[in-house]
Image (cartoon, rainbow, N blue to C red):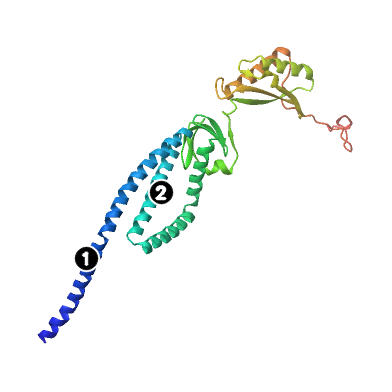
Amino acid sequence: MKQDIQEQVAEPVQTVVQKLESWFDTFINMLPNMAVTLLLLIIFLVLAKLGSKLFRKLFYKASNNEALGHLFSTIVYGAILSIGLFIMLGVLGLDRALTSILAGIGVIGLALGFAFQDIAANFVSGIILAFNRPFKIGEIIEVNDIMGQVTRTGLRDTAIATFQGQEVYIPNKDFLQHAFYNFSVLEKRRIDITVGVSYADDLDKVEDVVLSTIKNLDGVIDKDLTVFDYSEFDSSSINFNIRFWIEYPGEPSYFAMKNKAIKAIKKAFDEQGITIPFPIRTLDFGIKGVQKLSQMELNK
């Protein structure tokens, strides 16, 4: 009985010992490959660091976008290390493990792509904007009815300081999916003002007075491009538009110059006796099929 127990215990112990001996032999045989792998790790770490620095220097010669330069240098660093990892796994004979890792990365990447597609879209849009550079820090832009000065550009969003004193963060994909305005790139902006004058006024005189007033204002540029045009017969006035150009951005600002022009037009009209009429309603009791007021009998 005792001998049977000893045999039952000895058999698994022997199996374990044989397994350990096998692992030890495999470890001894793998020592040269492990030494080569360690050497390759050191080499690829050095190559990744040098490659990252070299790419950053070359990138900054073409662009001064620090966020994008840091991103691409990190990608170069990771790509070189990834190549080294694949080679090291091959040296260790872990090809099947390498295949499993690649398959797992593919599945995870696909799942993350669906889950974070908006983030990915903003990220890719940020890279495109960094290369195209349709606007710069300090320029005034408008997108989705939000207007302000660009204060920061990132790979995910762009920060705009509005004229109302708020900072708004615009997703980068909005700049590629929607039209946006850059008010700084041409360094000038047109002001449009609509005014109405009385039907009794001389329209040629009105045009001469308005054009003379606007062209003599300080801050108006490209005076030959100033445009005056009558636009419509309104209920109580004949309306016209005056369009002129100013430097932008800069002083005087858009709103200050518009305010100055309106005051100057009003002052010139007062001096020349030109009327900006109040709304007027005319009651006509002589329309066809209707009795005139003069023909109506009043009941006392």
258 vs 148, left or right, is: right
| Residue 250 picture quarter | top right
Quick one: SS at disc 2? helix
Q: Residue at x 33, y 44 (%)?
A: 46
Residue at far left of view: 2
In this rendering, the answer to whether 148 lies above or below 221 is: below
Residue 215 is at least partly visible in this image: yes
In this rendering, the answer to whether 248 lies above or below 299 is: above
Residue 111 percent location from the top left of the image: 46, 58
Residue 201 percent location from the top left of the image: 78, 19
78 vs 227, left or right, is: left
Quick one: SS at disc 1? helix
In this rendering, the answer to whether 30 lies above or below 228 is: below
Image label count: 2
146 vs 261, left or right, is: left
Disc sitting over residue 49 in the figure = none
Q: Looking at numbered disc 2 in the image, what kind of residue is underneath it?
A: Ala
Screen quadrant of the C terminus: top right
> Mark 1 or 2 closer to N-term?
1
Q: Nearer the viewer, residue 88 or 245?
A: 88
Q: Residue at x 22, y 65 (%)?
A: 24
Q: Looking at numbered disc 1 in the image, what kind of residue is underneath it?
A: Phe
153 vs 260, left or right, is: left
C-alpha separation, residue under disc 1 versus residue under disc 2: 34 Å
Which residue is the site of mark 1? 24
Which residue is the site of mark 2? 79
Q: Residue at x 42, y 35 (%)?
A: 57
